[in-house]
Amino acid sequence: QVQLVESGGGLVQAGGSLRLSCVASGRTYAMGWFRQAPGQEREFVAAIRWSAGNTYYADSVKGRFAISRHNANLTVYLQMNSLKPEDTAVYSCAAGYGDHITRAYGYAYWGQGTQVTVSS
């Protein structure tokens, strides 16, 4: 069992930045960030493989968001820049062992989520 704890959410104006953190209690194959806005389905945001550091992004966040990891601290970060009101959602990190790391079913463990609100 891997425990995940997110932090760093909050309220920011459009064009601003936030950095989310996710601390894992153990190491898996990959970590991902997903988000869910009210009334919408959960969607993939970004993912990273622990060992190789390969990164993957949703088209909607490419060029604005950056995922990174700190191996020693088992922490994954999501740097979010140029935020838009449509980025408003609960952001959750996930940890998994599979290859399908851009899909929610590719993850076995989930954090509780942190709210990100972007005002216009």
Image (tube, rainbow, N blue to C red):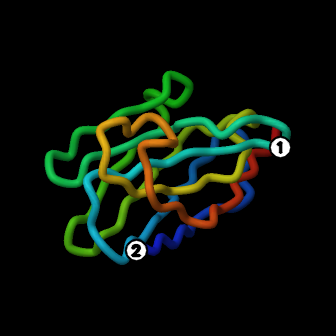
Mark 2 or mark 1, which has the lower sequence index?
2
Where is 48 relative to 41, above or below? below
The residue drawn where x is 56% and y is 25% is 60
Residue occupying the point 70% across, 44% down? 36
Decide if residue 64 is on the left or right side of residue 114: left
- Give whichever of 79, 93 is nearer the camera: 93
How far apart in space, not on screen, are marks 2 and 1 (Cα)? 29 Å
Three-letter code for the amino acid on which mark 1 is drawn? Pro
Q: Secondary structure at mark 2?
A: loop
Amino acid type indicated by mark 2: Gln
Instruction: Name the spot of residue 45 as percent of width and height, x first.
Output: 51, 38
Residue drawn where x is 65% and y is 62% of the image: 114
- Pick the front one: 106 or 24: 106
Name which residue lies at 49% across and 34% down: 64
Question: Within 10 angstroms of label 1, few (less than 14), some, or many (20 or more) residues?
Answer: few
For the C terminus, the image quarter is top right
* Residue picked out by circle 1: 38
The residue positioned farthest toward the top in the image shown: 59
Tell me the element at label 1. loop
Per the image, the residue denoted by label 2 is 1
In the picture, residue 15 is in which quadrant?
A: top right
Residues packed near mark 2 inside 10 Å, few (<14), some (14 to 19) or many (20 plus): few
| Picture layout, residue 40 above or below residue 35 | above
